[in-house]
Amino acid sequence: MVHAGAAVAAFCTGLSRPPRFNKVAANAVPDLAEARPDIGGGEEESLAEDSDVDSISEWELDFCSRPILDARGKKLWELVVCDSRRQLQFTRFFPNNVINSVTLRDALMYIMDTLGVPKPEKIRFFRSQMQTIITKACKELDIQPVPSQRCVALIKWLEERFETVYSQHPGYQEGASPLLLQQQSLPLDLPDALRGEEWAFVQLPFEAVLEEMEGVVRGDVFGSVLDLGTLNIDLSGDIMIPGVAVASSRATPLAAWTNALELACLEVDTQRSCLVLSTGVADRWRYAFYRKSRQTDAEGEAWEAAKKKCGGLHFLAVQSSLDSELCTGFWLLLDTPISPV
């Protein structure tokens, strides 16, 4: 846990300033060859040699069209699956006439049986338009589908594949827009159960953030972390990570309720004079408000600039008071990366 005020530097703000912080059923291996188009390479199925397969309990998945035309002049679809550390990596192209939950279910079974990985507890996906197909396939395999923007490793991999696979393919359609674009929704009022009593912009040294992450991993506090190795962000030991501290006299239930959400990121909305919390795939909430003035807008802009300096990395902390040395909840967040396809 983080101790004392030296660990935290609060932004200069007219708001409260804290001095511290803190088995799939036994089926035959599905044959995917019948649905497999000849795309001339670019597919992958691998498991890192030093992988601890039992630790791969959550997958990230994308099932969507690509800016590539097949021999029929139709867009190719692709399934991409990995875990947060990319120990597991699997891709498979499909023609557009076999896109359904049965194809996806069979592909998931193929991954488990062929690569020898256990059935995951959860599968995260970031395209809401594919929710019906993904949910049906997962439910048939007794896997929990999780709509989430926290598919960081997956989106980073899609960025790599865009450069090394999609754009190099002879059927690549330059300038083609993604078939399934995610529209940003208007922020809604936050449910009362998720609202704190006080809040403040804060920042923590990177080393202190690592300490808080360790507490989350151990299960000492509510929260969620990210695999920093997948982010490709230069995080030196003395860099300050911006965050938001929320205080509540009911900090434990507040942290528990917050943990039930799939938190993505926080952003300052100077038009509405509030913080906006993004959760799930496309949900946005008016999380906290401030009295609008040039000073408070400038403070919000400074906080956003600090996030940008850290590659979008930031955090949310829930505490019993803004003076507390302990957190009851800590979530490492990242400005949602945009999929290139």
Image (spheres, rainbow, N blue to C red):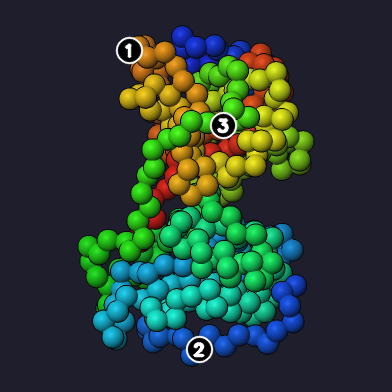
Q: How far apart are marks 3 and 1 (CA)?
A: 29 Å
From the image, tell me which residue sits under label 1: 294
Q: Position of residue 306 (x, y in %)?
A: 43, 28
Residue at 54% in and 11% down: 16
Taking 134 as reference, is 45 above or below it? below
- Mark 2 residue crowding within 10 angstroms, few (<14) / some (14–19) / many (20+): few
Viewer-side label of 3, 1: 3
Relative horizontal placement of residue 250, taking residue 296 as reference (left or right): right
From the image, tell me which residue sits under label 3: 191
Q: What is the three-letter code of the residue carrying label 2? A: Ala
Q: Distance between the residues labelled 3 and 2?
A: 48 Å
Residue at 65% in and 59% down: 144
Q: Where is residue 309 in the image (x, y as percent from the top left)?
A: 41, 33
Relative horizontal placement of residue 138, taking residue 269 as reference (left or right): right
Q: Quarter of the image holding residue 162?
A: bottom left
Element under disc 1? helix
Residue at 75% in and 72% down: 23
Relative horizontal placement of residue 328, taking residue 130 as reference (left or right): right
Q: Position of residue 189 (x, y in %)?
A: 48, 30
Tell me, yes or no, whether the two marked residues, 1 and 2, touch with CB atoms within 8 Å: no
Q: What is the three-letter code of the residue carrying label 3? A: Pro
Nearer-N-terminus badge (3/1)? 3
- Mark 1 residue crowding within 10 angstroms, few (<14) / some (14–19) / many (20+): few
Q: Quarter of the image holding residue 50?
A: bottom right
